[in-house]
Image (tube, coloured by chain):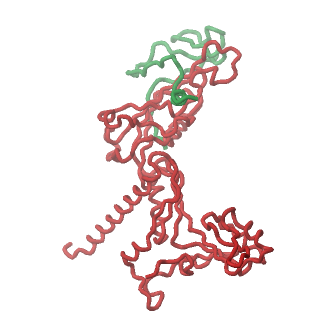
Amino acid sequence: MPPRSNDDPRRHVQILPERVGNVSGNDFPGHYPGEDHSWNLKRFKENLIVSLQRLTPSTLEFDLVGVDASIANALRRVLIAEVPTVAIEDVYVWNNTSIMQDEVLCHRLGLVPLKIDPREMIFRENPNAGALDTDTVVFQLRVKCDRQPGTQGETDPKRKYWDSDVYTGMLEWEPAGAQKTKWKRKEPKPVNPDILLCKLRPGQLIDLTCFARKGTGADHAKFSPVATASYRLLPHIIIRSPIPLEHQQKFVQSFPPGVIGIEKDKRGQPQCVVKNSRRDTVSREVLRHAEFEDKVQLTRIRDHFIFNIESVGQYRPEDLVPEAIKILLNKISAVEAGLDKLFDPEV
Amino acid sequence: MSESQQDTRWQSQNPNPMAPRPSTFKAPDVLNYLCADCGAENGIKSGENIRCKECGHRVLYKPRTYRIVQFEAR
């Protein structure tokens, strides 16, 4: 089989002025007479492309080509709701004389991302049993606000008082059992020490104990390891016939910068060419102008997914996708085992 | 700003130590009520006049007791 081309109209989702056309793929058995579209591992491997586009300490952009939308969507959903993280789950309030109600303060604490490797912790098996050093991490928050001496006439609360602002950096980890040796030099702490939890005034204090546990985003959004996990289809622009010289500037300006360029052709004539369709926002501006009618076709590649993932901080962004794939594979094994049981003649 | 300064910026700055957590939940003999007007602490025993010793204000607030309450962080 020849390598698949982005110009193959079967791979195109059409972007039309008023609607999106040719949305669903037809590459299933029996649709095209005389063509074999049965699933084939060798062909799947040939067509599958995974390529990293951009990696920063917190974000990841990668291309996933040659899979069905159901697989790409499963990956996205697993990233959001099934990859586990550790977050504060139980709060024991000893005292809280701040203006913030206990319930509100505890809810805020739960949403604080914690820098604890979830792979080194287990899920709590029995919610009624006592906490174990393998399933619970304890943090203490003890803050008291006092007046600073010798600050007459000062108006800035930060200079007038001590600890008028309570930050996540004030959460102190309390090692339990084997945790001290296990997490030497990677002590559990909040990902960001500068999140403002509450404000205090002299005489007010907050004194509480937090129990952090492992959970998944399906249970509560605070456990989700991604700030965003989304995909879009690769835009693909086809210039059907040359754009006349007088319209070329307007054509270039109908797209975001860098999408269309003007290059000299073989005869030395300037021509509009597609430079980088990835940068297109698919605003369809070009379709509004009568002079470009039938000269350009906007499409997206149906099986080319551009993933954008932003980690909250518990995992490195490059570790998130392998973790999600592991979870997806476990789900497939569970279905496989269930099917085996269902069709087992012995039972 | 230097690296070490950056690290301690979000930590507690108050040099005064906090009172330890009570180990028993025994009611104290003298409760330190807070004056609604001047904010002074007033140790008032039962039978005494309900009146601030500093300013004479007749409204006093009872402070929150130091007891543990469990909440779900949800």
The part of the image, by quadrant, that contains residue A29 is bottom left
Residue A109 vs residue A36: left or right? right
The part of the image, by quadrant, that contains residue A230 is bottom right
Chain A painted colour: red
Task: Please report the residue visible at 72 percent of the width from the left and 72 percent of the height from the top.
Answer: A286
Q: Quadrant of the N terminus of chain B?
A: top right
Q: Position of residue A278 (x, y in %)?
A: 60, 65
Could one spot residue A190 in this view of the protein?
yes
Q: Which chain is green?
A: B
Q: Position of residue A52 (x, y in %)?
A: 49, 59
Instruction: Using the image as rendered, state which of residue A143 and residue B55 is in the foreground.
Output: A143
Residue sticking out furthest to the bottom: A34
Task: Please report the residue visible at 63 percent of the width from the left and 24 percent of the height from the top.
Answer: A158
The part of the image, by quadrant, that contains residue A247 is bottom right
Residue sticking out furthest to the right: A246
Q: Position of residue B36 (x, y in %)?
A: 64, 18
Residue A118 higher or lower than B21, as above or below: below
Instruction: Using the image as rendered, state which of residue A66 and residue A295 is in the foreground.
Output: A295
Residue sticking out furthest to the front: A267
Instruction: Using the image as rendered, state which of residue A192 and residue B16 is in the foreground.
Output: A192
> How many discs appear?
0
Task: Please report the residue visible at 48 percent of the width from the left and 26 percent of the height from the top.
Answer: A142
Q: Position of residue B37 (x, y in %)?
A: 66, 17
Residue B5 vs residue A247: left or right? left
Could one spot residue A130 in this view of the protein?
no
Residue A114 higher or lower than A15, as above or below: above
